[in-house]
Image: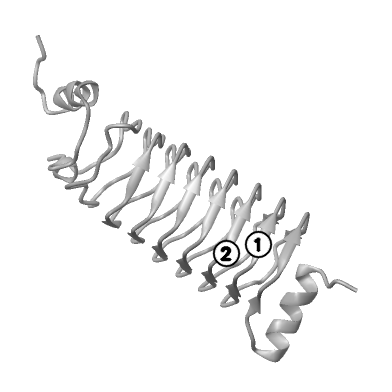
Amino acid sequence: MKQSLKEQIFLAVEEEKPIEGMQFEGEWMEEMDISRMEFDQVTFTKCRFISCDFLAASFYDVMFINCEFSNCNFKESYWKRVTIKDCKADGSKFGRSSFRELHITGSTFCYANCIQTLWENCRIEESDFKESFLSEVKWKKPVLSKVNFANADFFKTPLKGIDLSDCNIDHIMMSDQYKEIAGAKINMFQAVELAKLLGVKVV
């Protein structure tokens, strides 16, 4: 008989081993303590995690498809070769987490807290990061396509060399000197809006 995700978590905690090589579909978990759990080669489909605690959890070769993990705590977590597709992570906390070779597509991270995170060789496509917190973030070779960063907080996050020309960066928050945007690749219309912030009159 196939065990539920909750049963697998209890077993993994008891035996101090990772959850690996499994598929879970349609699971529902609320306010569950999943902290420091390791997931390896696991696929989650149509699963819902409501206000769960994933503190310092690790994800390797994991797929989240059409899942929801809004308002969950992922602080200090580690992600490598993970795909997040058509998911909802609004309001979740990812502070001080590391993302490597992460692929996010068709997902929402509105109001998500990603302060002091590391993003290395990550791809984000057609996703919504509206009003998210991305301050003091380190980006290394990201690919960003059709991402909505409207009203996101980029305070002390260097954007030099990053191509934002295909993204919405309306009203993003930066330091008083707007030094974060220096060296970023932007399109003509974005340049006009940024010029207004700098007090430049475009005629």
Give x and y (percent) for residue 26.
78, 54
Residue 141 appears in which quarter of the rendering? bottom left
Of the two numbered discs 1 and 2 on the same chain, state the one appearing first in sequence: 1
* Total numbered circles: 2
Give x and y (percent) for residue 17.
64, 86
Residue plotted at (64% across, 72% down): 34
Residue 100 appears in which quarter of the rendering? bottom left
Q: Secondary structure at mark 2?
A: loop
Q: Which residue is mark 1?
A: 43
Amino acid at dot 2:
Val
Q: Which residue is mark 2?
A: 62
Query: Compared to 171, does 51 lie above or below?
Result: below
Residue plotted at (72% across, 76% down): 9
Q: Give the side of residue 74 with respect to residue 66, left or right.
A: left
Q: Are marks 1 and 2 in contact (CB under 8 Å)?
A: yes
**Image quadrant containing the N terminus:** bottom right
Q: Give 84 or 49, whichever is nearer the viewer.
A: 84
